[in-house]
Amino acid sequence: MTGAETGPKPRGRWWPTGAAVGVTAVLAGLPWALRDRLPDRPATHWSGGGTPDGSLPLWAACLVPAGVWLLTVLATSVRPRRSGATARPWRLMTLAPTAAVLVGAQVSVVRANLDHTDWHQARQPVLGVVLIGALAAVAAVAAWRFTPRPAAVPAAAPTLEVPEGERLVWFSRTANPWLLLLAAIAGLVAVVALAALAVGLADPAGLGTACAASAVVALGCALFSSVQAKVSEAGLEVSFGPLGWPVRRWSPAAIETARAERRLPSQVGGWGYRISGLGTTVMLRAGDCLVIRPRGRRADFAVSVDDAERGAALLNTLRSRPSTD
């Protein structure tokens, strides 16, 4: 008898739909269910001292968080055709903390406005913000813990013929111009905010936050806008940024195997230094990556560089050589 086999469909494909519906119902339904005990315009934003400085109509307070959630669900549902079965191991790690923040914020907003007739009377305790952050952190850790890891696929480890007594060094570098541009823009914003702060043009608290956030973004993008990989008798050295710092190193004896593998940003959760179900990936451009499995570890380390197959082959050759100690 011929024909395609049929069987129970995996349940895992339905959980995003259930999460989308459930969280949307909570976000939109909670304020509406308690509308008789809330002001016509609930307070939705508070200043540093817990005093409200912004409000929304009740319908907007219901629909805006629900819309943000549905857009997040939709964004994490997009997958290129070639991204493979492991394209979205990061979906749960994105949706879980997002849901925790949105639901926690909505509960906090409703609680602060409950039984007040004017939104100016609502007060938001600082402890509520701390609890929301803690809830998001717990959700992220739990999602990471329960995200299924892809099964290891055995592959032939490439090697390179190196004549006796000859030493070879392999070097490759990759840069992402968009991260460099973002670093430059964020750095410019930080400088402008610092200058405005120095001459007292605006509120110091707001400007200080903007300056610090922009500086962090600029530094992070600059550090991880380029990567250099070097394979020599000392092993693998991966350095970041225009200054070649920070640096990660593995000796040949510390590497179990090396290979070249094609990866996409959709498989690892985006651009930059990413941690996903595939392990750690330095993703600066889609395509071939040099992937190693450190000895004694279950997670891979991958870096997107050109000529990755030759680098992996040389690394396996060095790894298989007898120690000279």
Image (cartoon, rainbow, N blue to C red):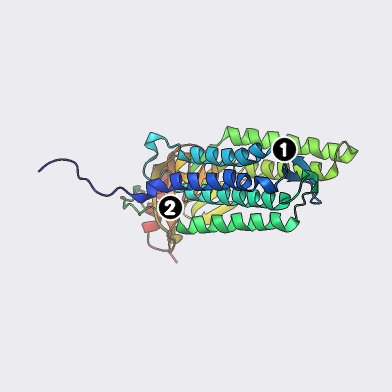
Mark on residue 239?
none
**Any part of residue 212 in sight:** no
For label 1, the SS is helix
Q: Which amino acid does label 1 sit on?
A: Gly
Q: Could you say whether the residue bearing mark 2 is in a helix, strand or loop?
A: strand
Badge number at residue 292: 2
Q: Where is residue 253 in the image (x, y as percent from the top left)?
A: 43, 61
Q: Name the residue under label 1.
A: 187
Q: Residue 244: give x, y in percent of width and height.
A: 61, 46
Residue drawn at x 69%, y 49% as measured from the top left: 37
Q: Where is residue 273 in the image (x, y as percent from the top left)?
A: 55, 47
Query: Most extreme residue toward the front, as rendered?
Result: 36
Q: Quadrant of residue 214?
A: top right
Q: What residue type is labelled 2?
A: Ile
Q: Name the foreground residue: 45 vs 57.
A: 57
Pick whichever, 310 or 136, lies toward us.
136
